[in-house]
Image (spheres, helix red, strand yellow):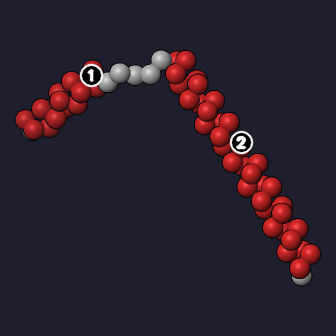
Amino acid sequence: MKKVVQFAKDCAAEMKKVVWPSRSDVASSIRVVLLSTLIIAVILGVLDLVFVTGMNLIF
């Protein structure tokens, strides 16, 4: 049981050392993720459209 208690204390001590990002850092990271996801989705959509059109022309 002592090991469990020591583990919990160590976890609490480590969590106090963590430097959490600010609200503006999180917001800017979310914007980057959403923008990159949108760009990749558009690129994949265009590629899919090109390939489907090409296949329809061939077959």
Q: Is residue 22 above or below residue 39?
A: above
Which residue is depicted at the point 77% across and 59% down? 47
Q: Name the residue under label 1.
A: 17
Give left or right: position of 43 versus 29: right
Which residue is depicted at the point 80% across and 55% down? 46
Residue 24 placement (x, y as % from top left):
55, 18
Say what secondary structure mark 2 lies in. helix
Residue 8 placement (x, y as % from top left):
19, 31
Which residue is depicted at the point 47% across and 17% down? 22
Of the two numbered discs 1 and 2 in the rendering, the one whose residue sits closer to the viewer: 2
Name the quarter where the N terminus is drawn.
top left
Circle 1: residue type: Lys
Give left or right: position of 19 versus 5: right
Q: In this view, does 33 lie above or below 45?
A: above
Q: Mark 2 points at which residue?
A: 38
Q: Give the Cα distance between marks 1 and 2.
A: 35 Å
Name the quarter where the C terminus is drawn.
bottom right
Circle 2: residue type: Leu
31 or 5: nearer the viewer: 31
Which residue is depicted at the point 85% across and 75% down? 55
Q: Residues within 10 Å of mark 2 (few under 14, many from 20)?
A: few
Give left or right: position of 50 versus 19: right
Which quadrant would residue 51 be assigned to in this image?
A: bottom right
